[in-house]
Image (tube, coloured by chain):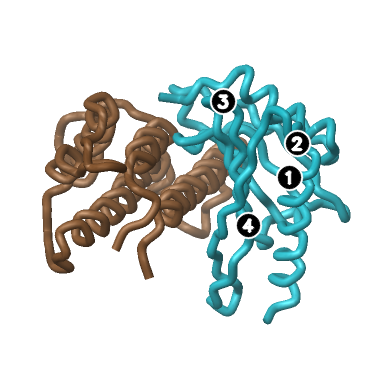
Amino acid sequence: MSEQREQFRRRVEELAARFEREVDRREWVTRRYPKRLRDDARQVYEIPALYLQKGPTSLLLDPIGYDVPGAEGAADLYLMPTYDPTASVYFEGGQWVIHYAFPPDSMETHSVVEAQALPLSAETINQDPDSIAEHAVPSI
Amino acid sequence: MPYRRFDWHEHIAEVWGEFRSARAAVDRLRAEVAGTPDLLKNDRVAREYLSRADENLDGTYIVRLFAAFEAALRSFDRAKRSDPARETKAAIMIDEIGGKRGRGIQAGIRQRALDVRRIRNDWAHEEDAVPTPMTVDEARARLQAYLHELPDEWG
């Protein structure tokens, strides 16, 4: 079993547990779902993805992998069911950091540069889902 | 082992993510070539085809996104009919697949997926007509929204 893969699995477990613990439980319901990934040796392993639901707004915290330039792990936060990207979470400098993405203009075909990065905390965890829920407009 | 809808969503999300990386790479290369015109002097083909790669990148990924979506529908269609060799046209599957409880899928959601299929055809068959504009993000969102209407598992 690759050391990198095992480390990533532990970090994603910790990330999902932090969201579960620190999201405002009076408003958000969470549910884990096992995501299957392949490691460098093409072996399948499972890590938790996490659904977050508040009324009609549904988000998915979706682990992406550990082979990411400039980071030791990445997960995306999508607005469901259209999988619109709202933020990315990177493991950088020994901690999870949340990067807010400007939603791409629906007519924009070229790449968009992200804007703001903040260490993951109870405040940023709640700020992000809440701000998404407040402004949630699926792209279609 | 049953097929999981989640895995098909993830497959489409991965194709879309690859597009975003490819788009960033092409944009960056175009900008660098504009500033340093001899940047690709040792790669004649890459230099000559850079503009076309840029023009066709979105269409290429719409074709790939739709292929992933069609594979999901085919998997569901074959499981539902208990016929592993069944070959149903994509347009028919989009219109006739029954959704979570076999009650059909909302007309608007179906139509948005059919629009992506039409644009996929324009790109895949290299029609003379200019394909109707649709961003890759829009195509991804439409296909994911349709897929969301299928049951959690099948097969």
**Label 1, on which residue?**
A20
User: Do labels 1 and 2 touch, CB within 8 Å?
Assistant: yes
User: Do labels 1 and 4 touch, CB within 8 Å?
Assistant: no
How many angstroms separate mark 3 from mark 1 (CA)?
A: 17 Å
- Residue kind at label 1, given as amino acid type: Glu
Q: Are marks 1 and 2 on the same chain?
A: yes
Name the residue at 69% across, 25% down: A130
Q: List x then y, in percent, for residue A24.
A: 76, 32
**Front-most of residues A90 and B125:** A90
**Label 2, on which residue?**
A23
Q: Are marks 3 and 1 on the same chain?
A: yes
Name the residue at 41% across, 34% down: B141
Q: Quadrant of the N terminus of chain B?
A: bottom left
Residue B52 placement, left or right of B127: right
**Label 4, on which residue?**
A48
- Residue kind at label 2, given as amino acid type: Val
